[in-house]
Amino acid sequence: MEQEDRRSISKEYFGKERLAEHHYRSFNAFLNRGMQEVVNEKETIDTDIGDKEGEEPVHVELGDVRIVTPRVREADGSEELLYPQEARLRNITYAAPVFMEMEIVKGDPEEGEDRVVDSTETKVGRMPIMVGSDKCNIAGFSDEELIEIGEDPADPGGYFIVNGSERVLMTSEDLAPNKILAEYDTKYGDEIQVAKTFSQRRGYRALVLVERTRDGLLEVSFPSVSGSINFVTLVRALGLESDEEIVHRVSDDPEIVKFMLENLEAADVQTEEGAIEELGERVASGQGKNYQLKRANYVIDRYLLPHLHEEGVDEEDVRINKAYYLCRMAEACFELALGRRESDDKDHYANKRLKVSGDLMRDLFRTALNKLARDVKYQLERANMRNRQLSVNTVVRSDVLTERLEHPIATGNWVGGRSGVSQLVDRTNFMGVLSHLRRLRSPLSRSQPHFEARDLHATQWGRIGPSETPEGPNCGLVKNFAQAMELSQNVEDEQGLKRELASMGVEGIPGIEGVDRRAEGD
């Protein structure tokens, strides 16, 4: 190949759009789909109006969310288009108004007596916009047009402007959610085997552990339950009652069956009702029997493996799927104990996932929307108490959402107690900017050794630059993408993927019609 050809190909490959492309794609996906998905999750805002005798209940229904391009409100009340350079010079935030459809509904919809009091699209706040993204005012401008408005044509974008400061969201490295990892307990060597899953759904993350103790018994621990629960008891509470079905679901291997029989002999309860009662005594000891049962059912539905919840799927089927999943985790423990599988490597890149700008903004928008919902609820109840007319525009205070979105980007203190997520763009030189946009950070503590996590792992080849990492406490924890790295994003058409798998003969896929959910091999 001619040198000129090589040069033109590399120029094209490392062109302006490519270097921060992962930020753009992620943020654009958040604006196009992610925001609406978060609003659909919330769906309604319930209020306490209607608790009193003779009072009609009131709730708010959330509809479509829409975002325009960045604007600035002038002193005379007029709104003008805002360009990034103006935001930098005036020390203001490069943000766009967010509009949402809202309906205040009176009456009980279940009794068919609900009626809409007020329905309108209202401004709920302002969302900081990434420079160069689809909603940016300079998207698609030619070099000449950019120079005319004071922008640098070579600027890669991919960052936000908050109060005049340029802030970049650091790509965060995390362990893969909803994936079984089997390993030995670090404190006790290879005597105790653990299978763990970070079960994640709608921003909530729950660590579920299945542990094989020294005497060969399996125990499960998950959030909101202190200590651990006997594996067989929990599986029975989920609907797998018979000994034969439990063993068959774990494994048909004779050696694993022998381990399982020991567990079945040690189990105290034999029925589903008895298992739920025992669980109730653990999660609500000292309370009444009815409350204990209610609490036990709530805990296993809400906190145990939340990622297995599917919209429109029967609760009983969800519980059976949870039981099957726990059996798969138990099998991983036994395989590890028998030396049939290696301990999973946390530092292998197949076991890692990266959170880019769009994913981080989604987490932020979810908490901001919850805060707005609480405020709308409070304003509605206050207006109702004073016998005022209930209207959408008077109960929505747009600065609630705006503050919750801008403050974390301005300070770097993110939801979930993480700090340093947003950083000032390193403008030392052009290469510094590019390096900063392609940086990723590990959530591990800087003050501890973590030798394996800091090491260069073979699976980083072609993904992570082997030499660009700081010296000192951040060594190996702050890394940079390799030059030709391509970051794949979430699958957009999940149902299409499931149908494709079903057509290949994969059985028991949740949410696909005509597939036996309890078939072999799910």
Image (cartoon, rainbow, N blue to C red):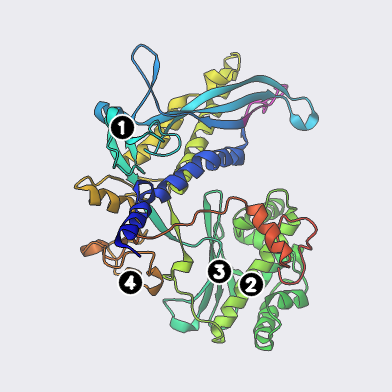
Say what amino acid the circle numbered 1 marks.
Glu
Report how far apart the C-alphas of labels 2 and 4 lie in the structure: 31 Å
Position of 37 compared to 323: left or right?
left
Give the mark, 1 or 4, whose residue is nearer the N terminus: 1
Residue where numbered disc 4 is placed:
456
> Cβ–Cβ below 8 Å for labels 3 and 4?
no
Is disc 4 placed on a helix, strand or loop?
Answer: loop
Residue 50 is a magenta residue: yes
On screen, 201 above or below 197? above
Within 10 Å of disc 1 (Cα), the crowding (few <14, some 14-19, many 20+) is few
> Cβ–Cβ below 8 Å for labels 2 and 3?
yes
Question: Could you say which quadrant of the image residue 258 lies in?
Answer: bottom right
Q: Residue at x 42, y 39 (%)?
A: 133
Say what amino acid the circle numbered 3 marks.
Ile
Say what amino acid the circle numbered 4 marks.
Leu
Residue where numbered disc 1 is placed:
144
Question: Could you say which quadrant of the image residue 240 lies in?
Answer: bottom right
Q: Nearer the viewer, residue 122 or 387?
A: 122
Residue stretch in magenta: 48-62
Residue where numbered disc 2 is placed:
328
